Image (cartoon, rainbow, N blue to C red):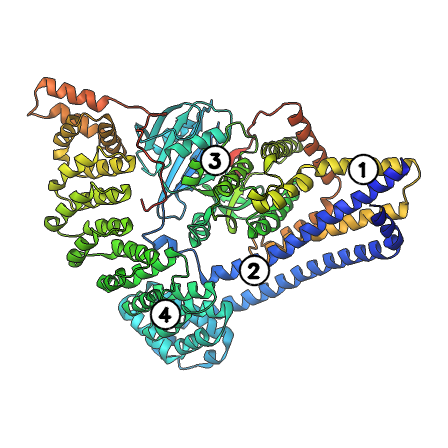
Amino acid sequence: MLRFLVLANDGLFLYYLCSNLIYLALLIIALRTSARHHRELKSQPPEWIKSSPLAPPITLLIPAHNEEKSIRTSIRSFLSLDYPELEVIVINDGSKDGTLRELNEEFGLRPVNAIYVAQVKSAPVRALYRSTRDPRLVVVDKEAGGSKADANNAGLNAATSPYVCVLDADSILEPDALLRIMRTMLADAQRMVAAGGIVRVLNGSEFENGRMTRVRLPKKSIEIIQVVEYLRAFLIGREAWAQFNLLLIISGAFGVFRTDVLRAVEGYRGSAIGEDCDLVTRVHRYLLEKGQDYWIGFVPDPVCWTEAPSDIRSLARQRARWQKGLLDVLWANRDMLFRSRYGTIGWVALPYYWLFELLAPVIELGGILTIVLAACMGVLSHEYFVQFLLFGYAFATVISIGAVLQEELTYKRYNDWGDVARLVTYCFLEHFPYRQLHMLWRLQGIWQYLRGDVVWRPQTRKGFQSADAR
Amino acid sequence: MEFVSELLRRIGPAHFVFKAILGAFLVDALLLGFILLRRTYRKRYFTRYNARASHFQKCWGDLVSGVNTDDRWCRNAFDRDIVKSLALGALETAKPAEAARIHSFLRGSGLLQRTIHEAEKTRGWRQRQAFIALGRMRAPEGVPALAEGLRDSNIETRLAALRGLGYTGSPEAGKEILEWLGEGRFTVPALPIENALINCCRERPQMLLPYLEAKDAPMREVLARVLGEVGTAALETDLIQIADDPHPELRASAARALGHAKPRIALPVLEKMTEDEVWFVRLRAAVALGELRTSKAIPALIRALTDAHRFVRFRSAQALVEQEEILQPAIFERVVELGDAYATDAYITAAENAGEYGSLLEALRQSPNMDAERRERLLAAASHRIGFGGEKRPEDLPAQTVAQ
């Protein structure tokens, strides 16, 4: 028993060391690549797409479920995006509130019989409408499919462009976000099948008519910690993984896909809990099985602002859902692990996600239990324990500050000195007790999945109106 | 595992872990220090930059016209960059007379020569920025340096040079790009090449024709797409020849360009192309028939409504709906006579999307030359829906990534 405890504690130390070293390597890669990207932007600005007659059309897919509070503002904002050939499809996913009425009042909808071919599965479509005030806007009114994936599938059937951009109805895209993401897609149009942009936390910022007017850090600790998390996940994780074509997730809040590829993989899996991760993994699988040369990228400069949970309960639900989604995707694709036909996805990306993302809370909990047990049995060196904690703390802080540094060196959205000071402060504070709570929420997600609770539940949000008033 | 355990225990607390903790906190401190220093530096830099930019903006007229003879800014790299950036910004919106004045200033002040020098002598991102600046200056002197950049070994540099040549929009730049492509150096993505060539070949699209005879298929595709954009009625004879090319992309581009030709010449060619074996050639032909703006294209467009591909049907219907309003009842009657529900559906959809559906119904109700039975039949057809949610023709293919 004693021997087991000693081994478990050493194993835990090695696990954290590996996890942090991998993240450190990702940080170094991300710093290098984003510096290169930043320079490229200077010599190849995306504005040329605006004046190019060959710019391909793009369809925005916006699923809306009970979004009456914010739908007018957000659709107005999407229609005013800076892109020459735009089609906006709003999918009213069986809303029980006045979403459709709001759309009708704002945009003057008339029923149309637009060509709609049900190539991918979705719940039945009740009607199609086109705006009389802006013919670029199409509304697909469908029965509730129970998931965002189902709504996106209906939108995919109605899309008429070679590229689709999936968004959340309550997100805000920066005006040039589509130009920026398409610049990368078109730089290698043959190989690029999908790309994700960066998602940032809008809580605390000021905006008007669906446009960001001033970027500020939120006030609440729980929101600031999420800002740090988003910066770390996008500016380090996704930026670096994308360099090796190992991206397994493109955020459902903002991603561009080639329409033909999405249709070829039969769109989203309706029952998927983490539909965004599931889709990207299936795209990898499909293209690898076909033996195609392809690339799935991440572009760090096109920005989508999204509302993050502002209370513990919502955050806990969101993180449990993410963990459930991850388990759902990894389990469904377990046959890709360590198979040569799936290349580095099967040998590197998926094992990493299993070991350092999915099982992290389980290993962490196991580690805490063995440490407590070792302390009770008198085999824990207190000196060693304290140093282990300090080491883990300092190393993890390096990664978080590295993410803030990355933001400072490149995109610098937080201009206020006070905001940066608070951001850095929370790099030190997020490790206790937030990290332990996060572990519990993730464990809860795994437990819910194992118990068979696999229903997709939309997140409750405040909407623009309330946020505008803040 | 035992080895690791022993190793950690031996070197652990005293050395490795202690050093690691110190190291990590030191890195934390360094990162923070760097962020603070960088912020302070940038704040000072931009304060200075804005002050100088504001100073030059105030005396911009005098500076460009040569009234202000104080040329100290030329010897200061910081000031020089500000003046260059102001000049480039002014050129973007300048009318011809003002542009000539700015060009003269760029030459007289040595800014143009210096940018050419940077484009030729520097490397990496500095060189790429010089290429873009040179392109934005739209001066013929810059073209040779940009052309040289096309032959660089680095793809980013080649792209920047290409972009620069595209900005100039001059036929000379177009000639350089075409020569470079002719050397078999098709080594950058297609879209930037097409974009640059569209800008540069608009004045003289005929310069593309000799290069279309090349054997390199991807290059011909690129040039064909450019020709489709910039082709004019003056190239009718060549376009008719290209319309018979074995490569579908070339045929599609010829169809696109023929939309700007004289209807008398283009019509028979485009009618034939609506029966092409490749769907996007048929689609382009249908669009071009609509662009001819002649009622003589109507029979071919009605035939195209029965096409196996839904995009062809839809674009043909769009072209029909865009015909004169007075012709719509007669067009609709002929569509109904086809007895093809998909053709009728495509036409009604196009009418709805164009906001003309109500007018069509009204025109059918008010049409004086129609007996009651015919009217009822047409109104019933106009109200019929195939409906959505699964029905499609068996021949329908999934949408592909082609120019829509």
Name the residue carrying label 3: A169
Mark 4 or mark 1: which is in front?
1
Counting residues from the N terminus, which is met first, the one under dot 1 or under dot 2? 2
Cα separation, mark 4 vs mark 3, equals 42 Å
Camera-side residue of B172 and B211: B211
> Which amino acid type corresponds to the residue marked 2 in the rendered image?
Ala
- Do marks 2 and 4 share a subunit? no
Q: Decide if residue A73 is in sight here.
A: no
- Do marks 2 and 3 share a subunit? yes
Cα separation, mark 1 vs mark 2, equals 39 Å
Which numbered dot is residue A351? none
> Which amino acid type corresponds to the residue marked 4 in the rendered image?
Met
> Which amino acid type corresponds to the residue marked 1 in the rendered image?
Ile
Circles 2 and 3: CB atoms closer than 8 Å: no
Q: For the residue carrying disc 3, how many other residues have a C-alpha within 10 Å: few (<14), some (14-19), or many (20+)? A: many
Which numbered dot is residue A368? 1
Name the residue carrying label 4: B137
Disc 4, SS: helix
User: Could you say which quadrant of the image residue B226 lies in?
Assistant: bottom left
* Chain letter belonging to callout 2: A
**Is the N terminus of chain A in the top left, top right, bottom left or bottom right quadrant?**
top right
Q: For the residue carrying disc 2, how many other residues have a C-alpha within 10 Å: few (<14), some (14-19), or many (20+)? A: few
Q: Tell me if residue A266 comes above or below residue B55 in the rendering.
A: above
Disc 2, SS: helix
Cα separation, mark 2 vs mark 3, equals 32 Å
In the image: residue B207, left or right of residue B41: left
Circles 1 and 2: CB atoms closer than 8 Å: no
Q: List x then y, in percent, for residue B345.
A: 25, 28
